[in-house]
Image (cartoon, rainbow, N blue to C red):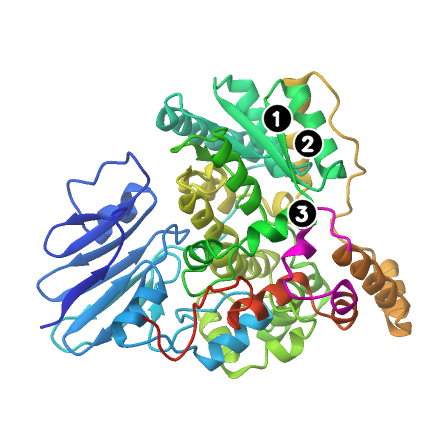
Amino acid sequence: MLTVVPHLSTRWTAVGRDGFVRLAPGAAVPAELTAQALRRGGELFSAVLVTEDEIQLLTDHLRSWPLFYAVQGEQVHVGEDAFAVADALGGRRLEAEAAAEFRHIGFVLGDRSLLEGVRQVPSGTTVRIDRRTGEITARLERRLQLQRPGFEDIPSFTAAFAAALDAQMQRLYERADGRVIALPLSAGLDSRLLAALLARDGYPRVQTFTYGLPRNAEARASARIAESLGLPWQQVSHTPQQLRQAWTDPSTGSFLREASSGASLPHVQDWYAIRRLTAEGTLPPGSIVIPGHTVVSSAKDEPLRHGREVTPAGIVRCLEPWHFALRSQSRRAVRLPSVVEELQRFFTEVRLEDAPRARMDAVRWFWQRERQAKYILQSMRGYEHAGLEWALPMHELGVWEVYESAPDEAISSREWYRAMTEELYASVSGEPAPTAAPRALERSRARRTAAAVAKSTGIPQLRSRLRTVRAVVDHPLGFDALITGASPRRIAWRTAAGMTPLGEFAEQFLADEWVPGSSLFGSSHE
């Protein structure tokens, strides 16, 4: 009879017979603790439940808290990172196929991890392990899935989306109960929408912040937005030397482990800012960070709108530049055997119909199940590492459910979202929204033809690559300083050859060279 061996922190609550659950801080454990009750309640959760017959491992629709496991003998080792589970198995061995994926993507697809023998529970999934036979089955229970449109027009949909978001903001204020709500503020739509809501609702303790090199354009724009809304704002400035000195301190190794969990590239964008703000006391322990992550995605399915039919190959070609291009070798990446296998599994989860909604559904779900869940939302581990809490109002189920029923013309681009954000911002700030010409929903046939002709010359790609080299070698936020052990010339040459900063980070991370003394991988670890 299999038993659970936990490798979980004190953030998890023991429940029932050898079970564990993790909920948002302050949330009450449901009286009826079953898989059905957890999913029906709509709260964020991860859970390990044990019945007479099976061990159930569950994640919510976001994979809010990762869950890793391995079966060895009569024991099921369960942990919140793959490293602890691998240690229990006898040592950390980097899984070669997973590492090959990681170099191109920045995370591991599907249910695998970077370490041999250790698996993870994907978003919205229940894994069942038979306690007598050890048989493992997995079922996707909740995914982002576009339903039949439920609104007559864009204004009615926008009103419903705004109402759902307002409800989540009210829940956030009740949970915060006077504690600091911190917002990383940029000039983009997502954080500007949250800033306008915080200002409109008058929550008493808000701290917005921006980071990067002194006098960068993003900081100047963010300062203007915060000032127009009457919100406190702070820039966390650094020089490349300061950033590198902090990053290469051996203490950063513990951040790498928690932020990665053994399956994802650590998200470092606001790492230094959070480190400084917590050390200075600007963000006291328990402050709640609300990064501008949202279910509203870009129209990445546009390349599919002009073909005669939708095929798996067509969807993969559409996904390639967004998911598999850390080394500018996306076609090579999607041909890796492990990637092919996972893409085949993905296509059992979506409908391949020659209809706009089916195309949008497929592309959005892959984006959510993989990059959003495993890289973008995995960044919440960095806030937890710093002793902070987090919330994602624009990713709560109530907001998802409205978005899933949106009219096609609303979600074929982000223009409806732009209009909603700018209208709210203008009404709260009393100032016109930043001017931007509406973007066409898609390029005309003439523009597509012209682009194809230009592409055949190679000149646009050359210009783009040169702009990329300049942006990487002299990054406006200074992130080139985190490519450790490399001269600007070496970075420039590798960037010109197609390497991206994230690709550099992934390579150094796997080689245990990103932070001196991190030692996360190897044949054996103490």
Residue of label 3? 413
Label whose residue precedes the other's in the sequence (2 or 3): 2
Span highlighted in magenta in the image: 474-491
Give the Cα distance between marks 2 and 3.
24 Å
Along the horizontal axis of the image, is 142 left or right of 298?
left
Along the horizontal axis of the image, is 339 left or right of 447?
left
Residue of label 1? 233
Label whose residue precedes the other's in the sequence (3 or 1): 1
In the rendered structure, are the residues bearing label 1 and label 2 in contact, judged by CB atoms less than 8 Å apart? yes
Along the horizontal axis of the image, is 12 left or right of 432?
left
Label 1 packing within 10 angstroms: few (<14), some (14-19), many (20+): many
Label whose residue precedes the other's in the sequence (1 or 2): 2
Q: Position of residue 13 (x, y in %)?
A: 21, 46
Q: Is residue 30 above or below residue 281?
A: below
Residue drawn 21% across the image and 40% down it: 29
Which of the two marks, 1 or 2, is nearer to us in this view? 1
Q: Residue flagged by tag 1: what amino acid is it?
A: Trp
Residue drawn 65% across the image and 57% down it: 300
Q: Which mark is residue 222?
A: 2
